[in-house]
Amino acid sequence: MGGVEFELQTQITFVIKVTSLNHKYFRNHLEDALSLGRPLLLEDVQEELDPALDNVLEKNFIKSGTTFKVKVGDKETDVMAGFMFYITTKLPNPAYTPEISAKTSIIDFTVTIKGLENQLLGRVILTEKQELEAERVQLIEEVTANKRKMKELENNLLFKLSTTKGSLVDDESLIGVLQVTKTTATEVSEKLHVAAETEVKINTAQEEYRPAATRGSILYFLITEMSMVNMMYQTSLAQFLKLFDLSMARSKKSPVAAKRIRSIIDYLTYEVFKYSVRGLYETHKFLFTLLLPLKINLERGFIKYNEFQTLIKGGAALDLKASPQKPFRWILDMTWLNLVELSKLSQFAEILTQISKNEKVWKVWFDAEAPEEEIIPNGYSDSLDAFCKLLLIRSWCPDRILSQARNYISEAMEAKYAEPVILNLETTWEESDTQTPLICFLSMGSDPSNQIEALAKKLEIGCRAISMGQGQEVHARKLVAMSMHEERRKFGPLGWCIPYEFNSSDFTASILFIQNHLDDCDKKKGVSWNTVRYMLGEVQYGGRVTDDYDKRLLNCFCKVWFSEKMFDSKFSFYTDYIIPICASVESYLEYIQTLPAVDTPQVFGLHPNADITYQSNTAAEILNTITNIQPKETSGGGGETREATVFKLADSMLLKLPPDYLAHEVLEFTELVGITRGTDLHPYLASQSECLWYC
C-alpha cells in the first residue's frame, strides 16, 4: 500500500484513475487514460497480466500522422502525451516472468526493518521535535534542488561544447556559459557543504530518539511474523502506525529526553503486546509472549544468534553415533544430544565433563519437582542469567521449559507480561469506530455474547443478535469463565477418559439454576444439597458425560464440594484455594488476584505427573512453531542469518569486479552506446541509473 500512496501523492497535475483487472470497465479505463493522456493505476494484479496490456507495455505504438495509436485487444486507441501506467501487487514475493520484467520497471515497496525504523524515527521526531523534522525535510528539498541545478548546468555546458563549431575561445556565448556555470557551481557547492554540516547536526539530534523507532520496528515485524503461524493473524502497517502514534500521545511526558524515550518504549511495548495477544488463539498467546523478549534481546545483542538457534532446535540435527558417548543410562538419548549441542556455547563448554564427574548431584537436580527453582550444580546458579537457565532447562527438562520461560519473560520484560491478558470488551470497543468492526473468532467452549449484551446495556446502545444460518437456536447466554471440568480436559486421558466439550454455557446454566434454587428455597429448611448435587452431577455437567468412571468422578466432586462443609472456615478446594470471608466485592476480587496465574494438576485432583505430558507437548509445539517461521537456511549449523548470507554473496560479487571499475563511467558508456544505436536503455540499467543518482 506504500507504493499506491506514493503514486497518488506524486500525481499532482491529474487525478490518477485506479482500476483492477476484475473491474467490469477495465478496458474503458485503459482506453480513456491512453486517449486523454491521464495516469492509470492497475492494482492487485497476480503473477500473470491480461494479454491486452502487451502492446501498451511493449510500446508497440503505430504512428498515424502527428499522433500515435496502440491496439488494445481488437480496438485501436490514440496515445496522448501524459499517459502513465502503474501496476501494483499485494503479493509478498511475486515471481514474474523475464518477459514482464523486461517490459516494466519493477520497484520493491516492501517494508524492511531498517526502512520502517527510519519511517518511525521520522514520526517520533515529528511529534517530539517538530522543528527538527521540518528543518530536515527542507534540507532534503534544498539539496535535491541544488543537485538538479548542478546537473542542468553540466548538461547545458556539454551541449554547448558538442554543438560549437570552430574555435572554442572565439565563441562568446560559450565563454558566458562557462562563467555562469563556474559561478553557480561554486555557490551550489558551498550550499551543499553547509547542507552536509547541517545534516550531520540534525542526524545527531535525531539519533537520540532512534531506540523508540527501533523498538517499534521490532514489534511490527514480530506481529507480521505471526501471520505465518495462522493466516488470520494479519495486521496492516496502517493499524500499527495508528497504535504507534497513540502510544506516543498517551505515554508519560518528561522534559528529559532519555526518560521520555524510555516512557514511549515501555508504553508502546505493552500496548502492542495487549493489542496483539487479544487477537490470538489461546494456544498461540504464550508463543507470542516468548518471542517478544527473544526478538528484543536479539536486536540489543543480549542474545546471540547461535544461542537462539540452540533454544529452538536443541540437538535435533545431531547424530547419536557421531556424538560423544553417553556416560549414564538414565540420561535419555535426546537429552544427551541437547547437552552436546549446548556444550558448543561458551557458557556450557565444560558441562559434559562436569556431568560425567558429578553424576549424583546432577541426578538429584534432574529428579527435582521444579529444577528451575533449585540450585544448579557446579555453580551455574550464580553464573547464568534467566535466558541461559532456559537453555539448560530446555536441554535437560523439556517438561519444565514453560515454567522457566515465564521466569525469563518476567526478568527480561516485566512480571505483567507473564500474566494472562483478560479481554476487556469496553476498552476494545473504545478503540474501534464505525469503519473498524470487531470480529470474534471463537474456539470450542467460548461465546462472548453475554459480555457483548452487558456492554450494550451499560452503554445504552441497541444490540441485535442475528443467526447466521437456518434452524439455529438463539445464542445461549454464557459467561467467559471455565470450571474445574474444563481445566481437567487439557490433561487429556489423565483428566477425563473421554474429551467432553464442557463450555461456558454449562457454567452459566449451573449458576442460573443455583441462583433460582436459592431464591425459591425455604429459609427454615435451607439448601437442598441433594438437589444441587443431582442437577450439577447428573444434568448440567453430567448430561455430557457418557463414561461410567467419569460419571463416578464427577459425582464424587459434587459430593465433596457441595455440602454444608463448604461454609466451614477450614474448607478448601486445595491448599491455599479457600473461600474467603470478605465484606465487599472488591475484597473478593483482590483475593482472586492473589491466586496463581497457572494452576497445578493437584488443584484439579490430579497427580503432579499429569502435568509432565501437557508441559512437554506444549513446549515442543511452541519451539517447533518458532523454528518453522524462521527464515529457511541452506545448511544446518551455519549459524548465519539471511542478511549475513546476502552480504557475503554481495562481497563475493564485488571481489570479481576489476580494480579500476567506476560505476558512473560504465553507466555513461552504456547510455552513450544506447543513444548511438538508437535503442532505449534496458530497464535494469535504468534502475541502476536511478540507484546511482540517489547515491
Image (cartoon, rainbow, N blue to C red):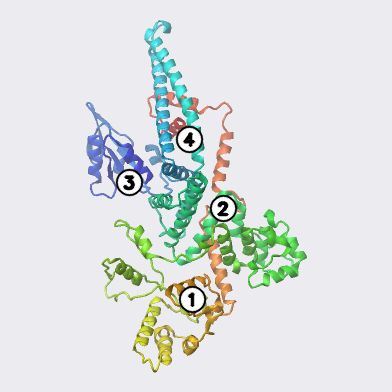
Please tell me the numbered disc located at residue 202: 4
Residue furthest out toward the bottom: 525
Residue 510 in the image: state x and y as whole percent.
Answer: 39, 82
Residue furthest out toward the right: 357
Q: Which label lies toward us, 4 or 3?
A: 4
Q: Residues within 10 Å of mark 1 (few under 14, many from 20)?
A: some
Type of amino acid under label 1: Glu
The residue at which mark 1 appears reads as: 487
Please tell me the numbered disc located at residue 43: 3
Please, is residue 288 above or below residue 590 in the view? above
Q: Which label lies toward us, 4 or 2?
A: 4
Q: Residue at x 37, y 38 (%)?
A: 104
State whether residue 315 appears in this view. Answer: no
Whether residue 485 sits left or right of residue 334 in the image: it is left
State whether residue 150 appears in this view. Answer: yes
Q: Residues within 10 Å of mark 2 (few under 14, many from 20)?
A: some
Where disc 2 sits, the SS reads: helix
Give the CA distance from mark 4 to mark 2.
Answer: 28 Å
Please, is residue 548 above or below residue 626 in the view? below
The residue at which mark 2 appears reads as: 297
Type of amino acid under label 2: Asn
Type of amino acid under label 3: Glu
| Tally of numbered discs | 4
